[in-house]
Amino acid sequence: MEHRQLGRSGLRVSRLALGTMTWGLDTDADEAAEQLSTFHEAGGTLIDTADVYQDGRTEEILGDLLTTQLPRDEVVLATKAVARRKPGPFGGGASRGALLTALDGSLRRLRTDHVDLWQLHAWDPSVPLDETLSAIDTAVTSGRVRYAGISNYAGWQLATAATYQNAHPTRTPLIATQAEYSLLERGIEREVTPAATHHGLGLLAWAPLGRGVLTGKYRNATPPDSRGATSHLASYVEHHRTERAARIVHAVLTAAEGLGSAPVHVALAWVRDRPGVTAPILGARTNTQLKTALAAEDLTLPPAIRAALDDISAPDQSYPERNPAQP
């Protein structure tokens, strides 16, 4: 698998990342072990998790596997904090105390003394930004974190945080941002992607398969063994089951047929090679699904097909994102 620099940093990661949101829920520990082995054998290095996934159980599963199955120094380990996990002053949010408490909890569950990429899972408007960012600086200077990033930030939030960190040489620069990005969700192209590129942050794209809709399996019905059939993820999938999405899915299926490939590969290859993207995050439920997704590494979309997909999925844009008004 090819590797890329993550943002304007020296950290190199695989251009496909392994997501773990379903571990401990729809993916048990044995299946997770198979996924980790498959991903590693394919040359993957970047593994993404979060303290809030299954109330910490996901990190525990990953920590066990990095102790018993795979050497810790062969992966780039990324986790996130901010989401509320329990009551009390340090149970969630982006205060300095809550963040550093969350980090210590993640390290215990992951059974490691440091994470390679620590990400702020969401913007917290109730906490002064300088306080939130000071937690990143403390985490890095203490050796518990190597690099820092953000997740689900709007363009102005990203630019504000990055500018603050870059304003002083002793602060830790942000090198990555996570955002939902797929042929069905291109809203970040208005402001987030340009801001990330300007400030040197690499983009990690979650839900690159449009929450599963771009596979084509939801075209006519909801398969009983799919995420869309579960009570906890039905609304997550339903979000992208629209008339517009149906047109885009049809285009993906047509492109896949013409290339002799699979819709999964077409959708992933499109995201992977978009400007600013470092890696799509693969959130497979099963090892079979992961193997299918990883095969996208072998596909590069022809310019004509990429242009057609760009056109049919183009997001609405207006002033000032499209073109500044002329005086």
Image (tube, helix red, strand yellow):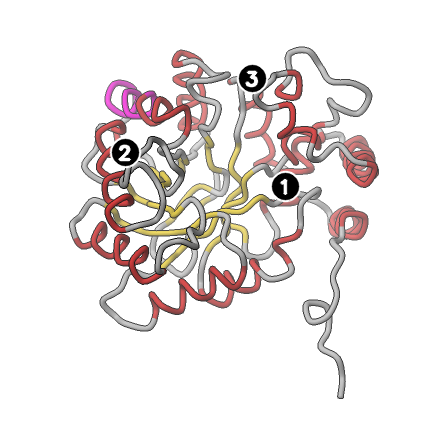
- Rendered image quadrant of residue 231: top right
CB-based contact (under 8 Å), mark 1 and mark 3: no
Sooner in the amino-acid sequence: mark 2 or mark 3? 2
Above or below 75: residue 176: below
Q: Position of residue 100 (x, y in %)?
A: 24, 44
Residue at image location 82% in from the left, 21% down from the top: 220
Residue at image location 40% in from the left, 33% down from the top: 49
Give the amino acid at mark 3.
Thr
User: Which residue is identified by label 2?
Assistant: 106
Checking the image for residue 288, the label placed there is 3
Above or below 97: residue 175: below
Q: Farthest residue toward the bottom?
A: 327
Sooner in the amino-acid sequence: mark 1 or mark 3? 1
User: Which residue is identified by label 1?
Assistant: 269
Above or below 226: residue 251: below
Q: Where is residue 153 in the image (x, y as percent from the top left)?
A: 49, 53
CB-based contact (under 8 Å), mark 1 and mark 2: no
- Magenta span of residues: 61-69
Residue at image location 79% in from the left, 32% down from the top: 253
Q: What element carries label 2?
A: helix
Q: How crowded is mark 3: few (under 14 residues within 10 Å), some or many (20 or more)?
A: few
Q: Distance between the residues labelled 1 and 3?
A: 19 Å
Give the amino acid at mark 2.
Ser
Mainly helix, strand or loop, the magenta region?
A: helix
Q: Where is residue 270 in the image (x, y as percent from the top left)?
A: 66, 44
